[in-house]
């Protein structure tokens, strides 16, 4: 593992536990380097936060893409819903960090806006393509607007991401209702 990767992993862990305001000194001390190493690899605190955000998104995307990689389009789409909802509802520090950075991209860390937009565009495209795959293989109704279904799934999953403050039982109930709705809609 490169020093940059080690610094990034440590920053993700620190940010997940203590928030993105964690000091360069604390991250550097965890790795046993000076904060100059962080400046060398990331340029600034904003640069580090941006790289943490990109890496957190990449790790989440890898998990849900893997979960939705097998089966027909319908199976893959529902697996994506299940995996995303499970991960978002896990209440782990990692997913609290991801939620924080998503929200901060729209409010206090505007330099993350472009990252968030690119990610959202790719997510929407992936979900729409899963619907189209299901329509081609006959597992999803062909009379549905694939883009509308994909965008609806994306919007619901983003909603589940920010619902982490709600009781887990309520989250599970809402997710189950959404999944049931999707099963009935696309069948």
Image: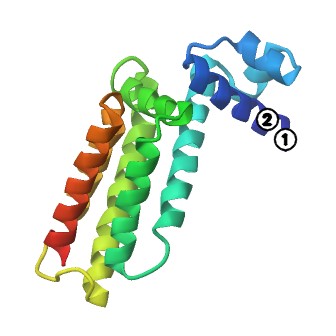
> Which image quadrant is residue 43 in?
top right
Image: 45 above or below 119: above
> Which image quadrant is residue 180 in?
bottom left
Residue under the point 25% across and 60% down: 179
Mark 2 secondary-structure assignment: helix
Which residue is labeled 1 in the image? 2
Image: 50 above or below 64: above
Which residue is the extreme one toward the right?
32
Q: Is residue 139 left or right of residue 109?
A: left
Q: Which mark is residue 6?
A: 2
Q: Which mark is residue 115?
A: none
> Which image quadrant is residue 66 in?
bottom right
Image: 46 above or below 128: above
Residue under the point 37% across and 27% down: 103
Mark 1–mark 2 Cα distance, whole angstroms, equals 6 Å
Q: Residues within 10 Å of mark 2 (few under 14, many from 20)?
A: few
Residue under the point 20% across and 55% down: 177
Visible residue check, residue 146: no
Q: Position of residue 173 (x, y in %)?
A: 25, 47
Visible residue check, residue 20: yes
Q: Is residue 54 left or right of residue 125?
A: right
């Amino acid at each position: 593992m490169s020093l940059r990767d080690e610094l990034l992993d440590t920053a993700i862990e620190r940010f997940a536990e203590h928030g993105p305001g964690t000091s360069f000194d604390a991250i550097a001390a965890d790795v046993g380097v000076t904060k100059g190493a962080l400046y060398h690899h990331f340029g600034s605190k904003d640069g580090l936060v941006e790289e943490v955000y990109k890496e957190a998104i990449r790790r989440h995307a890898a998990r849900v893409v893997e979960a939705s990689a097998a089966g027909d389009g319908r199976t893959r789409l529902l697996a994506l819903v299940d995996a995303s909802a499970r991960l978002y509802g896990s209440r782990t520090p990692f997913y609290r960090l991801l939620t924080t950075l998503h929200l901060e991209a729209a409010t206090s860390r505007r330099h993350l806006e472009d990252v968030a937009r690119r990610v959202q565009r790719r997510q929407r495209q992936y979900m729409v393509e899963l619907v189209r795959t299901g329509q081609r293989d006959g597992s999803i109704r062909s009379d549905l607007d694939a883009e509308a279904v994909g965008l609806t799934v994306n919007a619901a999953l983003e909603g589940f991401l920010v619902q982490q403050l709600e009781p887990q039982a309520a989250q599970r109930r809402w997710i189950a209702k959404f999944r049931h709705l999707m099963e009935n809609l696309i069948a």
